[in-house]
Image (cartoon, coloured by chain):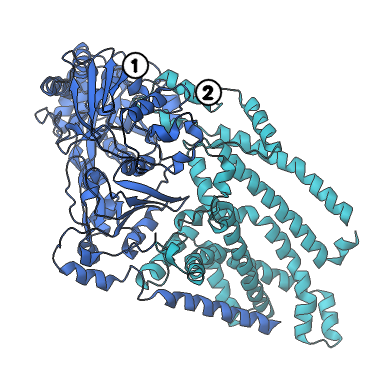
Chain colours: A cyan, B blue
Amino acid sequence: MLTYLVKRILGMIPTLLGITLLSFFIIHLAPGKPTDVMTEMNPKITPEAREKLEKYYGLDKPIYVQYGMWLKRIVKMDFGESFSTDRRPVIEKIWDTKQKLIDRRLFITFFINLLSMFFIFIIAIPIGIFSATHQHSMFDNISTVFWFIGFAMPSFWFALLLMMFFGIYLDWLPISGFKSMNYESLTLPGQIWDRTRHLILPVFVSSFGGVAGYSRYMRSSMLEVIRQDYITTARAKGLSERTVIYKHALRNSLLTIITLLGLSVPGLIGGSVIFENIFSIPGMGQLFYMSVMTRDYPLVLCILTITAILTLVGNLMADIGYMFADPRIRAK
Amino acid sequence: MKRVIFLLLIVIIGFIGAGCKGKAGQGPAAKGAVTTELESSDGEPAYGDALIEGSIGEPSILIPMLASDSASHSVAGQVFNGLVKYDTDLSITGDLAESWDISPDGLIITFHLRKGVKWTDGIEFTADDLMFGYKTIIDEKTPTPNKEDYLQVKKAEVLDKYTFRVTYEKPFAPALASWGNAVVLPKHLLEGKDITKIDFARNPIGMGPYIFKRWTSGQEVVLDSNKDYFEGRPYIDRYVYKIIPDSATMFLGLQAGDVDMMGLTPIQYTKQTNTKFFKENFQKFRYPMPSYTYMGFNLKHPFFKDKRVRQAIAHAIDKNEIVDVVLFGLGSSATGPYVPNTWYYNPDVKDYEHNPALAKELLKEAGWEDTDGDGLVDKEGQPFEFTILTNMGNSLRNNTATIIQWRLAKIGIKVQIRLLEWSTFINEFIDKRRFQAVILGWSLGFEPDQYDIWHSGKTGEKELNFVSYNNAEVDSLLEAGRRTFNMAERKKAYYRIQEILADELPYIFLYVPNATPIVHSRFKGIKPTPIGISYNFHKWYVPKKMQRHSMMEQ
């Protein structure tokens, strides 16, 4: 098993390299340069000034040379400086050690996604099981319709509706942001409570679509499993329905979910881009959106690399989870 | 197991429910209270309260000379002052400079600085700081798109602690306004440091009405009032620049009391803020922005070489219709490259009224007539058909193009519209002159010098006279306008330029949009002028009884 793990981890390296190579070329293929924002259609800029700026950012070199230079720095864990006018190291933008942990962008995105995953897991699985064991019941039918609506609803629109209802009409929850105006003057429990209130809507929105999807997967996977012969055997030998479902069927039906969760990391981070913008959550998704818009190559690539690593780690965790859930794989 | 999960669900629901109840009644959004407060009279100016301005973009750097985005400039503008500034009538008045002399030949400007102005760390501001800032901006190693105006300076010298002199090669009228950009930097803090690598950029020390306090990335920039500000302590104690990247969210924030001030879109201004709630709690403002939108022709293209064709198109278009439909009436039709209510705007130039019959006549004169009965005018067997290019993602321009397309179809001209991504549009089409007509806009501030846009020497690649306009009289007038500091002479030159442009129509000047900010009504002392509303921000105040935020936090 250990050799298997080592092999898996080593296998991740070429994949990661491939991802960075593709990302690098694709982002440079997009029309426009980081200096465009400053120079295009600006009466105060001369051609010499433009060239100087491009040279300053190293944009005058051929693209493969730029990739080589970038890769050389990455190996030393140096992600370079941002191309925006502040010229800060990109790592500092994502993981600012001068800020409190809770205000660091990567942490915020990671934390919210972890929370969403947690909620998706503990809500979707029971719903899926219940729908499967009570197939075609009233609950099953209603939840089918409900979750399909949830699945189909664009999250940005849903978010705005929730903000209007809870933020303005009822005035219970803050609309946006990650802390209140008077945050600094609150006591510690007050501060935790303040953050929690700001998190309720974003976490709800980001997990809602997930719950909708995963409860469906769980339902169909469970239906599949309870039709198997060994479930009939379990019932035949007189086990209680509860033992049959939760001991024998659940573990096998979870296999699908584990695989899917492992693959869901890029989707979740993609979703962060949307809800972090709508809710003004200062996470990595928001930063990613801004950096793409200004063609801030080092920052875009750094975030893509981090996402790639997280995805690969997610896949690895799924495989490990698989080993625990499925004895057949463990045996190999 | 089942029970455990069920219990967990109950706990979660309970938790959400509790979360909701917590806020009722507390917090700034207690609307009832605000309404009653407003019924009381205006009240005396008082110190205190905070203003929260919503912004889509986040500042990038707070050193004005390095910044190239509007968010950075609006925050840095509260922390730093320039030597001069625009007065409400758009003339130039002193800021850090008390006065200045211009030598009779217009080559030398001598600034006399205000005495006793202090950086907020207590050190006095002197001409050395100005020299230091000037040297930094012209330095090879300083990456900034803003240095062009300063490179015109031949010699800069510090005469004494409060006197600074610059000498130019040629008289250069826009030079004076250029010293309004904050070029000053605290020499005692920054000397010998690499300006691109300093903490100062995110933690600046200035001498303006507000002092930098805190910047939380992606969330807010907080400034506190400078109690020793040389024009008097600002009334509003705190200014918060809140970053909300989604404009629908920001608009909701306005209703919830999270935002006090923001710019409205035309639809928000005309439709969504007409409710009782907004009328009672907010004040809306409206003034022309120093920018305009135009349809530019490629004057090298055979279709558009003839002035009569351009005039015909102008007569076919109804500008007021565009303003009404596209901007919901929040703008005015443009007659030239300047904005109404400015000293260099010529109100008497000819405008082209909507008159399709006249348009057809003009086309006929120019040889364009529908000879084959297909509904399109043609000349020498070629039908009049062209493409308007504009950039993607700008619905105002896109809608304008559609209306023009429809109007021109009525006089027998077929128009295609093509939307392009901004960089592609500029690099592949504008720069290479691969276009017939474009819809674009200029936003140019309050300096009337438009040498780069209209001078016939500025038609090279990447230069801004991309329509290839060439008129000897305009060339000499542009030259004259930038070589004298005499307002009357400048005015004469710019008036004449507008007359010529209105006749020759290298562009069809379409409209001047309005800025439409909204501010919470507890803020008093706001006086709209041609330069906007925020010029006297340090004099805005909230009467004691209406103050919403107390500055307990230190």
Q: Which mark is residue B459?
A: 1
Which residue is located at x 13 percent, y 24 percent? Answer: B487
User: Of tags 1 and 2, which is closer to the observer?
Assistant: 2
Disc 1 residue type (three-letter): Thr
Can you tell which quarter of the image residue B9 is in? bottom right
Q: Quadrant of the N terminus of chain B?
A: bottom right
Is B197 situated above or below B468?
below
Give me the chain letter of mark 2. Answer: A
Disc 2 residue type (three-letter): Lys
Can you tell which quarter of the image residue B42 is in? bottom left
Q: Considering the numbered disc 2 on the image, is that residue within a helix, a strand or a loop?
A: helix
What percent of the width, then of the height, locates residue B276?
A: 21, 66
Q: Which mark is residue A55?
A: 2
Q: Considering the numbered disc 1 on the image, is that residue within a helix, a strand or a loop?
A: loop
Is residue B430 visible in this depiction of the protein?
A: no
Give me the chain letter of mark 1. Answer: B
Q: Which mark is residue B34?
A: none
Which residue is located at x 57 percent, y 61 percent? Answer: A112
Is B378 situated above or below A267?
above
